[in-house]
Amino acid sequence: RAVLRLRPLHRSECTAILAVPDYASVLDLLRFLEAELAGTLSGFEVMWNSYYAVAAADKRQPLKPGTPYYVLTEALGASPERDQARFEAVLADAMEQGLVDDAAIARSKADRADMWAIRDNIQARLQWWPFCAFDISMPIAGIDSSVAETEAALAAKWPSLRACVFGHLGDSNIHYILTVGEKTKDVERDIEEIVYRGVAERGGSISAEHGIGLVKKDFLSYSRSEAELALMASLKK
């Protein structure tokens, strides 16, 4: 049976975009917000500057591009005034500790919508067509180094590489979009091999939230053991 439990809807939404100087600070900031916001943290979306610069180009920019990382963070609560004051105090502490270089705090629903519009502006990448998109997961400590190593391997083969990264870092989930200027089946296969090899080296998953389907089927062994694959096959039979 299934049991459905209903809870009261939240009454406050505290939202901000933060400019963060380095990846170590991104991880420290996540741990800091999880502790200081004590269960109310509901969003921790990280955008590498490569993503933010393009996604924010045609939007109202709360912060200018150029900082290595941008974090869209949000906390949900029950008391708009008290929660907002607490949220801003926590962010002020984060800045004092050097975890954040700059911050833009939403003062209205319109401000919040503008911030999320940047995070959700995946359509801005249509100008890169043809591109390849990946939905991958791995332990968060190794995400940044994996991205750097993957981009270096791709650029060595395709000097015209353009890439950007963003995602739900609190869930160890990132989206990786890249273009090398062409997208034949052979080129796409070679790109997938490089990206998924980096995932496998860090014990990650080739699909964080969008499934396997037919496109990723040949690479499933990169993140599942032979025993797991056999179990999947037996269940389907």
Image (cartoon, rainbow, N blue to C red):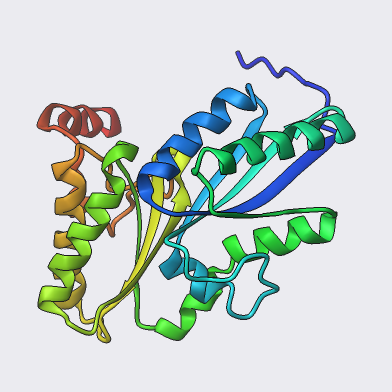
In percent of width and height, residue 109 lies at: 83, 55
Quadrant of the rendered structure where residue 112 is? Answer: bottom right
Residue 221 visible in rendering: no
With respect to residue 221, does 150 lie above or below?
below
- What is the residue that sits farthest to the front in this orientation? 96
Q: Quadrant of residue 91?
A: top right
Camera-side residue of 223 and 14: 14
Residue 97: x percent and y percent?
A: 52, 38
Residue appearing at x 11%, y 74% in the figure: 156
- Does 221 sit above or below residue 192? above
Q: In the image, what residue occupies the spot 56% across and 23% down?
A: 35
The picture places residue 147, in percent across and down from the top left corner, at 26, 56
- The quadrant of the image that shows the C terminus is top left
Quadrant that contains the N terminus: top right
Is residue 92 shown above or below 146? above
Q: In this image, 146 relative to 225: left or right?
A: right
Q: Name which residue lies at 75% across and 31% down.
A: 86
Between 117 and 187, the residue placed more toward the observer is 117
Q: Residue at x 62, y 35 (%)?
A: 93
Could you say which is closer to the camera, residue 216 or residue 53?
53
Left or right: residue 172 versus residue 84 is left
Task: Tell me, yes or no, if residue 21 can be seen here.
Answer: yes
Q: Is residue 154 left or right of residue 165?
A: left
Count of all numbered marks drawn on residues in the image: 0
